[in-house]
Amino acid sequence: MVGFFSKLFGGGKKEDLESVVESILNGILEKGNFDLSYELNLTKHEDATDVKIEFSGNDEALLKDYKGQLLDAFQLIIKRVTQHHFSETHVNVIVDCGGYRQESEAALIERAEHLKTIAIEQGKSVYYRALPPKERKVVHQYLALDGRVKSRSLGDGLYKKIKIYPAKNANIEGAEPAEEAN
């Protein structure tokens, strides 16, 4: 295994981004004995490159299990290796499997909508369970679209609760959603 990690982070000849990502993926899938295949898409922008990886295969359930922690691990490893090899390029990495990321985001928004309704109807604060930063961002961005409520994170550490409360000076009955900030 030492040879594999030295290959990932070691020096050597400069390759292109696509071949480095493919090398990482093939190495991990081989060493981990995963029954998975992947589709790799690279999109170059002026200031960044997006790397999107979609897994499929018999081991999809493993990637989605435990709230997608293995998907997050794949994403982190690929991000770190690409940062190491291409420090001058900003690379965004998204790893998904069978639409898991979209389903997860939809579930977060559905729960936030339910709590927002309670906060508006009862005129009091409600709390969303402790979430990691990435998930809190989804909830805060969704709630920011409605001017009738506000939200903020509470707590210490990585996982924090979200407080959802009615906005002051908001006409609760006829409030229109807030304009999206660009």
Image (tube, rainbow, N blue to C red):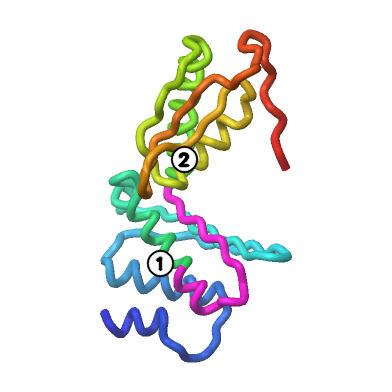
Q: Residue at x 53, y 36 (%)?
A: 140
Which residue extends farthest bottom?
12
Q: Is-magenta flag for residue 85?
A: yes
Which quadrant is the N terminus positioned in?
bottom left
Residue numbers of the magenta segment = 80-97
- Disc 2 residue type (three-letter): Arg
150 or 42: nearer the eye?
Answer: 150
Residue 89 x/y as whole percent: 62, 72
Residue at (26% x, 66% y) in the render: 33
- Mark 2, residues whose alpha carbon is within 10 Å: few (<14), some, or many (≥20)? many
The x, y position of residue 42, in whole percent, is: 60, 64
Q: Are marks 1 and 2 in contact (CB under 8 Å)?
A: no
**Quick check: is 160 in the magenta stretch?**
no
Q: Nearer the viewer, residue 54 or 6?
A: 6
Using a 10 Å C-alpha cutoff, classify the residue at mark 1 as few (fewer than 14 neighbours), some (14 to 19) or many (20 or more).
some
The residue type indicated by label 1 comes to Ile
The number of callouts visible is 2
Q: Quadrant of the C terminus?
A: top right
Reply above or below: 150 against 28.
above
| Picture disc at residue 126 | none
| Residue 149 percent location from the top left of the image | 57, 23
Q: Which residue is mark 2?
A: 136
Seen in the picture, residue 60 relative to 29 is either above or below; the reply is: above
Query: Which residue is labeled 1 in the image?
Result: 77
